[in-house]
Structures are given as C-alpha cells and as structure tokens.
Image (cartoon, rainbow, N blue to C red):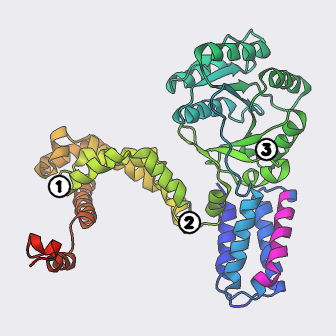
Amino acid sequence: MFDSLQTRLGNLFRSISGQARMTEANIEEALDEVRVAMLDADVSYRATRKFINHVKERAVGQEVLRSLTPGQQVIKIVHEELINLMGGGEEIPTLPRGSRQAVMLMGLQGSGKTTTAAKLASFYKKEGRRPLLVAADVYRPAAIDQLRILAESIEVPIWAPGANVDPVEIASGALAHADREVLDTVILDTAGRLHVDDEMMGELERIRDLVKPHWRLFVADAMTGQDATQQAEVFHEKIGIDGVILTKLDGDTRGGAAISVRAVTGKPILFAGMGEKIDNFEVFYPDRMASRILGMGDVLSLIEKAESAYTEEETRALSKKIRKDEFDFNDFLDQIHQIRKMGGVRELLSLLPGFGTNSAVKNLDMGDKELVRVEAIVLSMTRLERMRPRILTGSRRRRIAAGSGTTVQDVNRLLGQFEQMKKMMKKSIGSKFTPSAKDRKKRAKAKPKSIFSRFGGR
C-alpha cells in the first residue's frame, strides 16, 4: 500500500532534507509536489486542500525559514499534519466492560464485512471478551455459511437462524441469546448491496434502533479509493457511524481512502485489515501509519508482532538452546513458521526505518519464496538429520535435494548458512551473559580479600 505516495514523497524529501536555506518560493514548489503526490494516491481533493493549507501555514512561518535545518523541519511538519489528517493522537476507543455491548458492521457488498466480523470477534476474544457472531446478511448467497465456517475456525459461537428470517428478528434473537449465554460482545454482520438504496438503509435503521449498538462501524474497501470515502459519508448521513474499518490495505491500493476518510467524515479509522488471514487485522494508529507512508518505519508494530509470535518462555528456551549449542533444524523450522506468522520477510522489513521506500524491499518476493525453498529442504530431512546435521553425507544430501526439488548445491549452501547463523546467534546471546575480559578484571579488583573486609575488617 501507499507505494506511489511513498516513492514520490521519499524522492521529494531526499531533495530538500539537506538544503541549508529555504524560501517561500521553494516551499511552495515542494508543496505542489506533495499535492500532486496525494491526488495521485487517490486522496480526496477536499482532504488534500485542507492538508496543504495547514502545512503551508506552518512552513512559511518563522518555524522553518529561521531554522538551522529547514528541509528537515518541513518534513517534520508534513509528518505531524499527516497524523492530524488521519486522526491525530486520539485514543483508540475500547468497549465498556461489565455489560453486554453490540457492534454493528455496515458497508457495501464486497467490502469484506463477513471476514471482518470474524477478525473483530477474534480480536475481542484475545482481549478477554466473549463475542457472539450474528449472521444478519440473509441476501448474499453463502454469506451465512461463510460466517459459520469462520466462527468455527476461531471457536466463537454464532447466531444464524437462517436466510428466511427477517434480519431485525435475527438481531433481536441474538441479543436474547447473548444474555442467556452471558456473551458480552454481539457482532452483527449486516447485509450490503452493490450500491446504496433506500431498502438497505431502512433495514439498517431498524436494526440500529433495536440493538442500540455501542459502535456503528463502516467497513470500507481501501481498493476503491475515493469511492470508499464517499460511501462512508453517505452512511454517516443516513445511519450515523462511529468509526471505520479499512479492508484490503495489503493490496494494490494507493492508500487514498486511509488518508481521506477521517478528514471527510470526522470519524476515526479504528482497525485495518492487512490480509486474508484472521490474524491479519490490527488497530489503526495514525502516527504509525504516517511514519510508514513517509518511510520512517513502524518499529512499535514490529515489536508487537514479535511479542504476539513469541512468548517469554519460548524466548528463554531458545536462548538456552543457543547457549548450549543445541539449536538444530527443528528449531530453525520453528523460526521460519514464526516469520511467516508475523507477515513474511517483506512485511517485516517494510516496518523498519528507511526500508518502506526502498525499491529493493518492495520487489522482495524472492525473500518469501526463499523461505519456502528452505522449508522444503528441511522437511526433506529425517528427524535425526535435523537434530544432527553433521551426519549428512553426500548420498543423504542428494536424497534431500531430490525430495525437495532443489539441487545439492542448494542443500550445501543452506548447511553452510545454518552453521554461520548458529555461530552468530551464540556469539550474540553469549555476549549478554558472559562478561568480557575487561569486566572480569574489574570484578577481580573489586572482589574483597576476605569476608571481614565487607564490614571494614582486613
């Protein structure tokens, strides 16, 4: 996402960051480039104009013109205003505890409401809540079956009386069922249409008035660009929305909806869908997204991904294995699975500062393909071979290459890289636990000659 905007803004900022002096004229020129970049990224004209005016107002003042690093100061202002445009420093609202709450998902057909409902249920389940999924979309073929399959995959209960029941009755029955079963989060997957019509809006109004949801969330497909913003505006006028969930932000999208929707509706983006899997769902933080857009990375999200993939016990056990030189290909295979769980090589590198606008990273499809190749080689080994790679003779290596669809050279290369990685990991882990020679000397000098010296004796 945001590839076009990242590239254009990255090139612009590189050209101005080293300038020792900036005038109103070249600030205007730079902002023209920013304006073109934003419109090209499908940011709405209204949001772009508001953004440019705010940046210009700050940039042509004394804050920049008298700064020792004016180019960097302009970048700082653009970053701060981009955060404000997408929602500022607003706290992400949480559902009140202690009573049953309802969340109503709305949007057009094809925006990803059903999948998003399951992702939201999974998110709240991890937060310690007890969600109930409600199949209130009785018009789209297979919508109920899709939600039922997703509910089973995340082990969340579902209320789905069938396609012949009125959606308002379904909502009413779901609330009663939630109260009986002490389920505190009712998530309604409502019906969508290919376009906004009076029949759909009337049905949504009746469900809203009955359920009185704590959140009315509009699910918008980021691939539709400005259309998503216009749709959100219409739903807000007709039904009223409390927030937005953007889906398909991992796709070939220019990202304009993410930047525009807050400025147009005045409502925050709460969550973002980053892929097809249930876990590809995250809280939307305007400051982190602004940093990604400007190529500054998103280290906080990277840390959160790592924390969700590794428990403290797993980290401690892995460190112990590395220190004892017991790290083998079974552990290596686990690490590959964890990297995939966190989004793959390209996704992880894109969160590091400076890598977001790096064309090499954007074209790093081979990075994830290489993981598949490595995994195939490791899986072609026997369990004993994974535990004791040194027994891999020439005939064994030929068998592994044939079984994984690779060459003996590929197998040899992996074995060499594995040994190098083990040495580096042991050195890295060992440095945290083993004192250096200098530290040992200091400790020896500081060590008391007898127990009495601790109390002032000799």
Per the rendering, the mark at residue 105 is none
Quarter of the figure that contains the C terminus: bottom left
Q: Measure the alpha-carbon separation of dots 1 and 3.
A: 54 Å
Per the rendering, the mark at residue 359 is 2
User: Which residue is disc 1 drawn over?
Assistant: 325
Name the kind of residue labelled 2 in the image.
Answer: Ser
> What is the secondary structure assignment of the residue under circle 3?
helix
Vertical relation: 256 (above or below) 355? above
User: Which residue is disc 3 drawn over?
Assistant: 228
In reply to whether residue 59 is colored magenta, the answer given is yes
Residue 97 position within the rendered picture, expressed as x and y whole percent measured from the top left: 63, 32
Q: Main secondary structure of the magenta part?
A: helix
Dot 2 or dot 3: first in sequence order is 3
Residue 365 position within the rendered picture, expressed as x and y whole percent measured from the top left: 49, 54
In reply to whether residue 53 is colored magenta, the answer given is yes
Name the kind of residue labelled 1 in the image.
Answer: Asp
